[in-house]
Image (cartoon, helix red, strand yellow):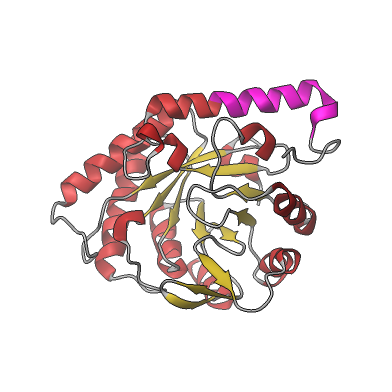
Amino acid sequence: MNLQHIFSTPNPIIGVVHLQPLPSSPRWSGDLNAVIARAEQEATALATGGVDGIIIENFFDAPFAKDHVDPSVVSAMTLITQRIMNLVMLPVGINVLRNDAKSAMAIANVCQCPFIRVNVLTGVMATDQGLIEGNAHELLRYRRELGADVAIMADVLVKHARPLGSPNLTTAVQDTIERGLADAVILSGWATGSPPNPEDLELAVNAAKGTPVFIGSGANWSNIGNLLQAAEGVIVASSLKRHGRITEPIDPIRVQAFVESARESLQSSEQNPMTSPESVKLAT
């Protein structure tokens, strides 16, 4: 995955637009215009705050379907994605929760999005939706059939889940890249809002052998400097919300503070090689 080809920066900050409940979800309000308006406001706030990319997720559709969402969700996400891409000049990616990677690829292909996020690409994870099996073979063949130029960013030992058997992070990263053909991997903490621990991040980066590693949860302006000393990029949501609450809308002031903190830490590392990722381990 050529990060600069997609994001025009080697260390992208990707903000997340958590869509309000969509048609057919348990908490669907019946007002798609309100969902669109909220999504456009959040995308604008992220772009104004200076992020390098956006991921659109059907986050508030919980409880999630395991691996196939209703067609109305695909239709709504396609419409909203097109609206957002007409509104902001940023790369936009898709994540269809819980693990409908094929629908994400279809939306991305139609809307010309450069990347998707897949929670379980390889292996088997025990989740609140039941057992989710990675389906890399189907997704990669579907991408080829579509002729889609869409990068796959895949979670490794994804949050809100537990692997069957022993959770060997090094093996999981290697399998996701070498056998699942992921273009980038994502490492998170145990749940939304929790960061990966430094030891796991170091293991993941070493196992990835040059494939980009992204932070998938728990980044904030106090820890982003340390996290980006090891990872190539970050996906962030909770800490950009008003009061840091997941249910609140994106706060452009918090976005700006996060981006400035990340940029300052990267500049500091470049100016002082003793703090670069090649010369130090991730700080605790």
Asked if 186 appears above or below 239 in the picture, the reply is below
Asked if 5 appears above or below 251 in the picture, the reply is below
Asked whether, in this view, residue 152 is left or right of residue 175, the answer is left
> Does residue 223 appear anywhere in the picture?
yes
Q: Residue at x 42, y 31 (%)?
A: 47
Q: Residue at x 49, y 47 (%)?
A: 193
Percent of width and height locating residue 117: 51, 57
Determine which quarter of the picture holds residue 181: bottom right
Percent of width and height locating residue 31: 14, 51
Asked whether, in this view, residue 158 is left or right of residue 88, the answer is right
- Residue 265 included in the magenta stretch of the image: yes
Q: Which residues are magenta?
A: 260-276
Which of the image's four quarters has the C terminus? top right
Asked if 108 appears above or below 257 in the picture, the reply is below
> Does residue 140 appear anywhere in the picture?
no
Residue found farthest to the front: 284
Percent of width and height locating residue 201: 70, 50
Asked whether, in this view, residue 258 is left or right of residue 58, the answer is right
Residue found farthest to the left: 30
Asked whether, in this view, residue 5 is left or right of residue 108, the answer is right
Q: Residue at x 55, y 57 (%)?
A: 190
- Residue 13 included in the magenta stretch of the image: no
Q: Residue at x 43, y 62 (%)?
A: 104
